[in-house]
Amino acid sequence: MLTLSALTTNINLVALAMSLWLGLYVVTRSRTSRKAWLAACALWVLAAYFFQSAVALNLPNSPFSWMRALIVFIVPLWINITFLFLPPARRTNWMRWGIIPLGYILAGIIAALGMFTNLLFSSQNDDALFTNTRASGGAYYLILPLLVLGFGISLWNLWRARQATPNANLKRQFSILLAATMIEALAGALVAYGTAYSVPIPFILPDILYFGGVFFFGYTVARYNATLEGRPIDRDFIYTLLVVGSLTLFYCLVVWGLYVTGQVSFLSLALTIVGTVLANSLFDRLRLTLDRVFYQRQFQRLRSNLRGLAREVGAGQTLSERLHTILHSMSRFMRIKRGFIAVRREEQYIVEATHDAHALGEKFSLQTLAASEIIGLVLPARKNLQEMKLLVPLYADGEQIGAVVVGERENGTPYGEADLELLEDLADQIARVIHDIAAQAENATRLNDLVADFRARERALQLQVDEMLASRAAPAPQAAREWDEEKLIPLVEDALRKLHDVPYLGEHELAQLRVVQTRVAQKRDGTPVTFLDCGKALNETLVEALNELRPATPLPKGLQVPPREWHLYIILHDSYVQGETNRDTMSKLYISEGTFNRTRRRALRAVAKSLAEMEASVTG
């Protein structure tokens, strides 16, 4: 039968492993966050407490009894973390330079008294299963104000931080932090009350509360940082927990078998847990460090990017999950009763996210949801779009890749001009999300194919990269190819974004245009041509095509708003040639972001068409 001592020991060992691992997880995912490091320190203090508790129950005269007093540092750490959650405007100097340092000083004094004197505990039984097995000393009552004021201030900080944030997701996270703080305060109160008044409370109860409170607090800090950084965490957390947990469990079971048979001591078992968790948790960081020793810079970057891509693709939300989140937020903000987002899959549209509307996976023909701009739905029942009011097309790279279909608003008011502009802006963002996720998956597939090919040839990845770079530096001549406007639009946009990066343009696909090659040949006059010459020629060709958009009328001077005929030219010229921000260009033309994006797409199409005509004239 499992005794109370054995049960307490097992719980302490599990809590030790989890606290140590979670602290390492928090800091390795947010290495520059002060909140992450403070939460990790609290978890590591708790890990030291659990380590000492487990060893004290199984070894007489434990050499680690001094670790128990470190638990008091959780209180000032908690105050410090919760203070950082406050908006900068609400952080007062009296707390930053008064309360927080005073908390650390008081905790240090209490810990020192517990380690080096008998003033904190006048006597202590090594078999400390109950709080009344230790007699409190005169200095023990310093703990009471530290607990009450410390956790009281922490709760106050979290409540103010929760009230200050408008984000519903962050409010939920602050609610969890408040609950974790109250759990931790309850655990401290149980230990303080039982020790001060000799009440026999089994330590297993506050130990579970200690671990539960700090674990939820540490995990929520990691989730909070991930939310602010726009980084997914759910799958990464579970994956890392399973990997580290399974390896740690394997080694610990081996050592536990040796401990049961008397081959090793209990201290060896406890140290095995610590060492295994540290080794498995820090493996990735150690690998990055060794990369700097054994690999050249370009291969360090390649290996790091490959690992980052694998983590983002594997741990990120699926397309349906992201679209559902966007649709839910949009519907709540604009008070839309129902709606759905459909994504194009080959020759049909499939519903990927829905809000009180059509079922997931429902299919529509291309003609049903085709549109060039926002349109109101007339007789929507004929298209199986009952109770829907607007269709918002989603465009990426000049092609419709989906559609957002929304119904009427909760208050019954019609959609105004401001609502339509907001829907246009949202449509651009949604289209970018769909495009980026598709590109991410496509990149992962390409990399998988490359790696499989490298392994089939039994060559190291480094040699293959050298080969690829060498072949890229001296490209083989290509046969003439057909160019059309639709193929050129995404290439033109990419080249314009790097208009002043001559090396990039020299290796760009557009550098193979005959109009560019002809320009290079005329300039070099028979001398060897480099990829930099191609880059310069492509730059000049793009600027020439862009200048075709310039109207013949003079550009207004001073503060006069340029007429509409100048918008196509100004948007591309100011953005890509002069490098001005989109916001400045919109202010200059007095247009909204939605109008800016639509005009930019028309301008890119015009430049691509001009480039295609230039190519056709040279080929002909």
Image (cartoon, helix red, strand yellow):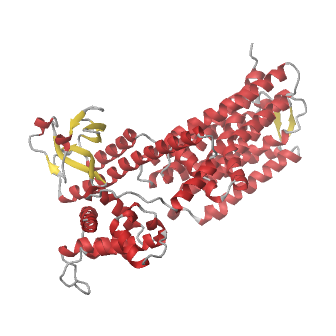
Which percent across, then down, holds residue 506? 45, 67
Which percent across, then down, holds residue 27? 64, 49
| 285 on left or right of 54 | left
| 490 on left or right of 96 | left
Q: Residue furthest front?
A: 526
| 519 on left or right of 268 | left
Which percent across, then down, holds residue 505? 43, 67
Q: Which quarter of the figure has residue 185?
A: top right
Which percent across, then down, holds residue 470? 56, 58
Q: Residue furthest right?
A: 61
Is residue 346 positioned above or below 299 on the image? above
Q: Residue furthest bottom?
A: 558
Does residue 188 show up? Answer: no
Q: Nearer the viewer, residue 89 or 428?
A: 428
Does residue 364 show up? Answer: yes
Is residue 242 positioned above or below 408 on the image? above
Q: Nearer the viewer, residue 336 or 613?
A: 613
Q: Nearer the viewer, residue 182 or 591?
A: 591
| 151 on left or right of 331 | right
The quarter in which the C terminus is drawn is: bottom left
**What's the residue at 25%, 46% (across, down)?**
335
**What's the residue at 57%, 36% (across, down)?**
239
Q: Residue furthest left?
A: 379
The quarter in which the N terminus is drawn is: top right
